[in-house]
Image (spheres, coloured by chain):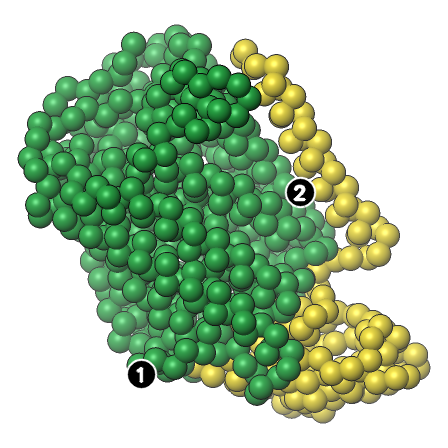
Chain colours: A green, B yellow
């Protein structure tokens, strides 16, 4: 049975599109900021190049890509799932719009402070570097806006469940429920850091702040943030791609198992970002390491299930033999190509992640260019490329306009893949050679050791240039479609069917309250003692510094 | 739950791989004491220069052990040139009176964050003589890329 949708509800689509366009705009600005960095790192002397400009652009790129583009796109996609998979209007539309305006106001405030050079603290904003208070307040508003969205998602699911007491949650909504739960659990950390520590301190109400406590709270949030980005991409891989490819989802229950495992394991892993920190005992770093390796498992399962679904698709398209199914897949479809290429990049990025998480080996790569090479494969490809592909597929279905400049949309994912290969691999290698990440200039007083990195920084810059052209193609398709796309009747969204038919009844996987509770228990086990121990230690705070 | 045979096989292999990864960590930890710098010691960042622990940064030798004290501040390491002997354990003790910095000796696995209010400490042994580049690898402000130093490992 095909799950199709009655004609879309106009007001819900306006809500979705509002979020969608903020995401696209943030992506456009952030891409321009990225080009500047890639060229600067290669010491290419452009007329406007300066250290202040470089660190401002790193901050703008990080905040607008990692926090704004992703969050707004995920909120838009959440509303797509509610309207097209639950087939209902989002609950409390007033709250949904309030969330949108709060998050948008916060984005504008934070972005203005960054572009004015008052907040060059990077997207990690570690104190005692101090940004303008409006930067922190703006970020807090983005989070509050996302909480409004989370409440709307939860209430929409609850209303649906009351009407369908025995039916299993549609798989797409199952994945979005996991996303919402991970987000609600983890944003507690960053909210505590920003509201209790940074806002009062930046306003001068408190004199000092404990930078290590801030780092612990930030990374309590910072790693599950990664799964907040990744889970909606997985929803697309599981519930959209098999059908786009012309096949069926290989296993529905395993997809549900994967989402539940992410609810459980996303948060108690943050110390793997603090391996090199003083003040955090090694034993707790080891506990978080073990949990971190646990969270590799659901991604391994995803790799199998999604690839098997693609093989099913290739064979349903008539392919025979061992590998012919690969060629039979719709490589000219922009969404399919985006996702397939992003999966290849993510396979490499995932193995890199296992290296970063290696307790004893992290010292070799910590804060080197290896790290930026790594996360441009994960968030910069698995997530961003999937979202771009999804944008080509969603925009016509939301706006009732045909995709314009289709050729650019077909070329764009391949260009991204090529650019990312050059960018990411060169950064992995220079990182292993010891080049630090996020430096304006890597010459270090003409040190011969640093000179060895130089040829590869040009490869990285070339990759950055290709990525920028790819991003520009994406923006042209988006704007072209909005302005000039031929009008047509709104189209339904078709979700993938499982190979063995959808599950008939609710199961243990639908017990979201239970899984959220277990997740909180795991968080308490991983964090309560180290935090308590930290807070009762005699500590000294830091006054603010603004060295930018 | 009905799981296909190949998928079961894959899941077992994935579980095995994860177990193997964790085993290498434990072996590294138990066999070579490979663990990240995790020293717990606090210090008032506003009085670092007066604190007896950091008032005279530099290299000192205590018996067979070499101790290097470093202050990392915007935008330099003090001392910015460090000379140590090869083949002997060297303990680095580092802190910051201002913002968060990093301390990375390029082409070695000596790497630590320097968080104001805390003392970073780790012990390592340099096998090869020669000149090494020390860089700050945590963004600390507009001249972050200008914050570096030199380590010279000399024949004992």
Which labelled disc corresponds to residue A386?
none
Visible in this render: residue A387? yes
| Image coordinates for residue B125, horizontal then vertical, percent | 83, 72
- Residue at screen point 67% across, 28% down: B13
Is A294 situated above or below A433? above
- Secondary element type, mark 2: helix
Q: Residue at x 62, y 37 (%)?
A: A294
Pointer 1 local density, CA inside 10 Å: few below 14, some 14–19, many at least 20: few
Position of residue A451 in the picture relative to residue A375 (left or right): right
Taking B83 as reference, is A224 above or below it? Answer: above
Asked whether the viewer can see residue A517, the reply is: no
Task: Indicate the position of residue A348 as horizontal and vertical percent values.
Answer: 55, 45
**Identity of the residue drawn at 46% across and 28% down:** A326
Q: Quadrant of the C terminus of chain A?
A: bottom left
Q: Quadrant of the N terminus of chain A?
A: top left
Chain letter, disc 1 residue: A
Quadrant of the rendered structure where residue A463 is? Answer: bottom left
Q: Earlier in the sequence, mark 1 or mark 2?
A: 1
Q: Give neighbour class at mark 2: few <14, some 14-19, many 20+ (Cα, 10 Å).
A: many
Give the labeled residue for mark 1: A47
Q: In the displayed structure, would residue A409 be above or below residue A461? A: above
Instruction: Return the mark for residue A290.
Output: 2
Chain holding disc 2: A
- The one nearer the camera, A475 or B60, is A475
Q: Nearer the viewer, mark 1 or mark 2?
A: 1
Q: Position of residue A322 (x, y in %)?
A: 55, 21
Q: Report the Cα–Cα distance between label 1 and label 2.
A: 48 Å
| Residue occupying the point 57% across, 33% down | A300
Q: Disc 1 on helix, strand or loop?
A: loop
């Amino acid at each position: 049975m095909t799950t199709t949708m009655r004609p879309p509800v106009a007001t819900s689509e306006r809500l979705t599109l509002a979020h969608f366009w903020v995401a696209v705009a943030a992506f456009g600005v952030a891409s321009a900021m990225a080009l500047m960095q890639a060229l600067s790192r290669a010491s290419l002397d452009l007329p406007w190049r300066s250290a202040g400009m470089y660190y401002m652009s790193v901050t703008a790129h990080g905040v607008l890509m990692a926090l704004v583009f992703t969050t707004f796109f995920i909120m838009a996609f959440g509303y797509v799932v509610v309207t097209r998979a639950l087939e209902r209007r989002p609950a409390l539309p007033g709250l949904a719009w309030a969330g949108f305006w709060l998050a948008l106001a916060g984005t504008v405030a934070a972005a203005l402070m960054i572009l004015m050079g008052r907040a060059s603290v990077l997207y990690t904003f570690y104190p005692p570097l101090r940004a303008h208070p409006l930067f922190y307040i703006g970020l807090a508003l983005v989070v509050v806006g996302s909480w409004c969205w989370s409440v709307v998602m939860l209430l929409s699911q609850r209303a649906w469940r009351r009407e369908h007491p025995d039916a299993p949650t549609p798989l797409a909504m199952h994945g979005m429920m996991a996303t919402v739960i991970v987000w609600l659990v983890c944003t507690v950390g960053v909210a505590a850091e920003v509201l209790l520590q940074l806002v009062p301190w930046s306003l001068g109400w408190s004199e000092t702040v404990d930078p290590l406590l801030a780092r612990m709270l930030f990374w309590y949030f910072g790693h599950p943030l990664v799964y907040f980005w990744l889970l909606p991409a997985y929803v697309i891989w599981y519930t959209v791609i098999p059908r786009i490819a012309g096949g069926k989802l290989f296993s529905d229950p395993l997809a549900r198992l994967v989402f539940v495992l992410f609810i459980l394991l996303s948060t108690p892993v943050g110390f793997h970002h603090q391996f090199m920190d003083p003040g955090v005992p090694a034993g707790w770093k080891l506990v978080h390491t073990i949990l971190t390796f646990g969270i590799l498992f659901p991604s391994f399962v995803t790799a199998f299930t999604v690839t098997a679904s693609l093989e099913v698709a290739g064979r349903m398209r008539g392919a025979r033999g061992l590998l012919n199914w690969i060629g039979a897949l719709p490589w000219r479809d922009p969404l399919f190509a985006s996702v397939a290429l992003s999966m290849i990049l993510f396979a490499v990025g995932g193995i890199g992640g296992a290296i970063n998480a290696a307790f004893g080996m992290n010292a070799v790569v910590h804060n080197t260019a290896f790290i930026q090479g790594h996360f441009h494969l994960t968030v910069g490809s698995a997530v961003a490329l999937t979202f771009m592909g999804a944008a080509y597929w969603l925009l016509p279905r939301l706006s009732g306009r045909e995709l314009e400049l289709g050729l650019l949309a077909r070329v764009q994912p391949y260009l991204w893949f090529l650019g990312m290969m050059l960018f990411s691999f060169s950064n992995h290698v220079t990182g292993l050679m010891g080049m630090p990440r996020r430096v304006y200039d890597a010459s270090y007083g003409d040190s011969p050791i640093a000179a060895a990195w130089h040829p590869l920084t040009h490869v990285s810059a070339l990759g950055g240039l290709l990525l920028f052209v790819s991003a520009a193609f994406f923006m042209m398709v988006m704007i072209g479609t909005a302005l000039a796309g031929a009008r047509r009747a709104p189209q339904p969204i078709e979700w993938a069917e499982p190979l063995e038919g959808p599950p008939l009844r609710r199961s243990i996987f639908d017990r979201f309250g239970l899984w959220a509770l277990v997740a909180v228990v795991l968080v308490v086990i991983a964090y309560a003692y180290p935090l308590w121990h930290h807070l009762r230690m005699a500590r000294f705070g830091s006054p603010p510094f603004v060295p930018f | 739950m009905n799981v296909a045979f190949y998928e079961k096989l894959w899941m077992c292999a994935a579980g095995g791989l994860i177990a193997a990864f964790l085993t290498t960590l434990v072996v590294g930890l138990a066999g070579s004491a490979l663990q990240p710098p995790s020293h717990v010691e606090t210090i008032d960042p506003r009085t670092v220069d007066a604190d007896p622990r950091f008032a005279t940064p530099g290299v000192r030798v205590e018996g067979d052990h070499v101790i290097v004290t470093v202050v990392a501040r915007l935008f330099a390491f003090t001392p910015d040139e460090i000379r140590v002997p090869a083949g002997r354990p060297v303990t680095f003790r580092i802190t910051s009176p201002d913002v968060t910095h990093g301390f990375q000796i390029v082409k070695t696995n000596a790497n630590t964050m320097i968080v104001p209010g805390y003392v970073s400490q780790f012990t390592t042994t340099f096998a090869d003589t020669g000149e090494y580049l020390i860089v700050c690898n945590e963004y600390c402000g507009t001249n972050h890329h200008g914050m570096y130093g030199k380590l010279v490992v000399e024949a004992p």
